[in-house]
Image (cartoon, grey):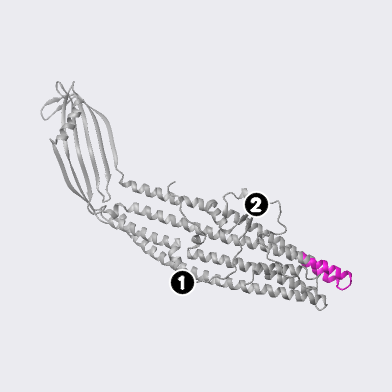
């Protein structure tokens, strides 16, 4: 393909001098893509951007990305919270109570009951926790100091203690690794889904930035075309006025040229408006503070590609299945639903708990002058194993109806079925999306070649018509129409190039390869 920018500039420059010169000027050399519209304020600050500059700026500055970037960190905190279910708890406590009993009478023995004042101090130290198999355990000691007015003579407070361990093991409902680690695994799957959602947003942002880059490039080139169109109309009007003065052109022809110039000036104003809109849209994508760069002109320096790339729809579909975050999210959601299904299936079972404990008791009666020393004697007694004690038992709880458990199980059974359908739908969306993107890219590539040929032929036709006008065998109306057709062809060519490059971006997005092609690695911070 011929270089489209060379075609454009050679066409316009040739036309600009076609009327006063006998022969059209030779094509001018390619002007760098950094050439700005003539109406650009030379004092306005400028920021020159490659397409990858814009992508990197968006990854760092785009507010949507910054907001979504925190979600994986939030999900990581949820995982940490879920893992706390197996933390060991240290329990310590001290309490005091007093019981005043009034004087009374025992009718059975016909004896009076003396009044009493009893004060109790209770204490405990223990470690409690839950194992991944569902075992609830307690290890430690507890005891009390009992002081009562009923103790005779020299006897002081009574010290009691139990030291040992107790466990409760579910045998059906609540038993097993799958059930007791379910919330942790759900949190981890949710974290993975959150990460893929972040990747999806970054991919969409990169796609938007790239497409906006090509729209901005097109808008700048479109203004330049419209400026040259206005300049050409001014030259034609000036030449027409000279011809009218010497009597070789009618006043009506000059009026037609004036009307054409006015219309093209209006088109230039509209093209400048489109450029302003494209620029502000691009600024919003790459900056979190648009106001700070309000006066800065963004200048894209990368040329759009005009070379048709070989496309393989089947290979693109395979890449879509490997890379699309939506597909990975659907698979993760199905796995998450399966975890919930197994958890709530277990909740349908009756509660059968095996409870057991083993330890040692101690009791010591102090004297009024030897009180807290008995506390130490209790430890000596339990460590010596003088008074062992144990218990074991089985508790069965069967909910009548079990409505809640059956409702939850049915919910997640349907959710698993729904997730499978969603996965199939995502697969179909990927296939259709890739196919449509390939069709678009192929069609846009052909439009470039077609529009370039149209521009070249319009240029030749216009140059020939100018010569016919000079020879008196054509009219101003036809020449002006030829000018307009050439300008339209050039704009169509620019649009075709921008659309082709946007189609390639859309295809890489559908493949899920847009980040790799843009040199972007997504690593959200999960440690905030």
Q: Around disc 1, counting alpha carbons within 10 Å, would you say few (fewer than 14), some (14 to 19), or many (20 or more)? A: few
Left or right of 111 in this view: 88: right
Marks 2 and 1 sit apart, C-alpha to C-alpha, by 44 Å
Q: Look at the magenta stretch and give its main secondary structure.
A: helix
Tell me the magenta residue range: 235-261
Residue situated furthest right in the rendering: 246
Identify which residue, 242 or 179, lies in the foreground.
242
Q: Quadrant of the N terminus?
A: bottom right
Q: Answer with left or right where residue 183 lies relative to residue 380.
A: right
Could you say where residue 473 lies in the image, as x and y percent from the top left?
Answer: 81, 79
Which residue is pictured at 46% across the width and 69% down the height? Answer: 317
Residue for point 28% across, 34% down: 93
Query: Percent position (x, y) of residue 2?
Result: 64, 71
Where, by quadrant of the figure, is residue 282 drawn? bottom right
Q: In this rendering, is residue 27 above or below 371?
A: below
Disc 1 element? helix
Q: Quadrant of residue 216?
A: bottom right
Between discs 2 and 1, the one toward the N terminus: 2
Nearer-the-camera pick, 298 or 115 = 298
Tell me if I can see residue 285 in this picture.
Answer: yes
Count of numbered circles on the image: 2
* Residue 232's disc number: none
Residue 42: say if magenta.
Answer: no
Q: Which residue is mark 2?
A: 296
Crowd band around label 2 with a 10 angstrom C-alpha radius: few (<14), some (14–19), many (20+): some
Residue that mark 1 sits on? 314
């Amino acid at each position: 393909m011929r270089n489209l920018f060379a075609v454009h500039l050679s066409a316009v420059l040739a036309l600009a001098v076609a009327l006063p010169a006998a022969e059209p000027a030779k094509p001018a050399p390619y002007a760098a893509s950094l050439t700005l519209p003539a109406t650009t304020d030379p004092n306005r600050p400028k920021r020159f951007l490659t397409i990858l500059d814009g992508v990197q700026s968006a990854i760092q500055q785009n507010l949507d990305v910054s907001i979504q970037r925190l979600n994986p960190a939030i999900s990581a905190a949820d995982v940490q919270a879920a893992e706390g279910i197996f933390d060991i708890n240290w329990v310590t406590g001290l309490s005091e109570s007093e019981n005043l009993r009034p004087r009374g009478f025992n009718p059975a023995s016909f004896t009076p009951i003396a009044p009493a004042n009893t004060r109790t101090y209770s204490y405990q130290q223990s470690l409690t926790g839950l194992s991944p198999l569902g075992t609830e355990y307690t290890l430690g000691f507890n005891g009390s100091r009992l002081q009562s007015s009923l103790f005779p003579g020299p006897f002081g407070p009574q010290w009691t203690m139990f030291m040992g361990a107790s466990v409760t093991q579910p045998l059906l409902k609540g038993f097993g690794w799958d059930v007791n680690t379910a919330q942790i695994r759900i949190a981890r799957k949710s974290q993975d889904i959150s990460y893929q959602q972040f990747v999806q947003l970054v991919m969409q942002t990169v796609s938007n930035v790239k497409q906006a880059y090509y729209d901005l490039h097109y808008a700048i080139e479109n203004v330049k075309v419209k400026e040259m169109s206005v300049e050409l109309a001014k030259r034609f009007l000036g030449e027409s006025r000279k011809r009218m003065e010497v009597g070789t052109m009618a006043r009506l022809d000059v009026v037609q040229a004036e009307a054409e110039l006015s219309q093209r000036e209006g088109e230039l104003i509209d093209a400048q408006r489109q450029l302003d809109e494209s620029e502000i849209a691009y600024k919003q994508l790459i900056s979190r503070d648009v106001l700070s760069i309000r006066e800065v002109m963004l200048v894209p320096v990368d040329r759009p590609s005009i070379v048709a790339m070989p496309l393989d729809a089947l290979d693109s579909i395979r890449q879509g299945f490997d890379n699309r975050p939506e597909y990975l999210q659907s698979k993760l959601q199905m796995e998450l639903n399966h975890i919930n299904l197994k958890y709530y299936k277990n909740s349908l079972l009756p509660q059968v708990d095996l409870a057991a404990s083993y330890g040692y008791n101690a009791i010591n009666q102090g004297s009024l002058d030897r009180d807290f020393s008995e506390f130490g004697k209790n430890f000596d007694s339990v460590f010596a194993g003088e008074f062992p004690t144990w218990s074991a038992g089985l508790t069965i709880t069967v909910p009548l109806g079990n409505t809640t458990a059956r409702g939850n199980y049915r919910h997640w059974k349907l959710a698993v079925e729904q997730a499978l359908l969603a996965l199939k739908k995502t697969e179909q969306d990927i296939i259709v999306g890739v196919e449509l993107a390939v069709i678009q890219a192929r069609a846009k590539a052909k439009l470039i070649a077609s529009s370039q040929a149209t521009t070249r032929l319009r240029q030749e036709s216009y140059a020939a018509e100018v010569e016919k006008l000079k020879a008196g065998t054509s009219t101003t109306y036809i020449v002006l129409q030829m000018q307009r057709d050439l300008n339209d062809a050039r704009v169509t060519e620019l649009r075709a190039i921008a659309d082709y490059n946007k189609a390639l971006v859309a295809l890489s997005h559908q493949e899920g390869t847009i980040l790799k092609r843009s040199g972007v690695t997504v690593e959200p911070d999960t440690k905030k």
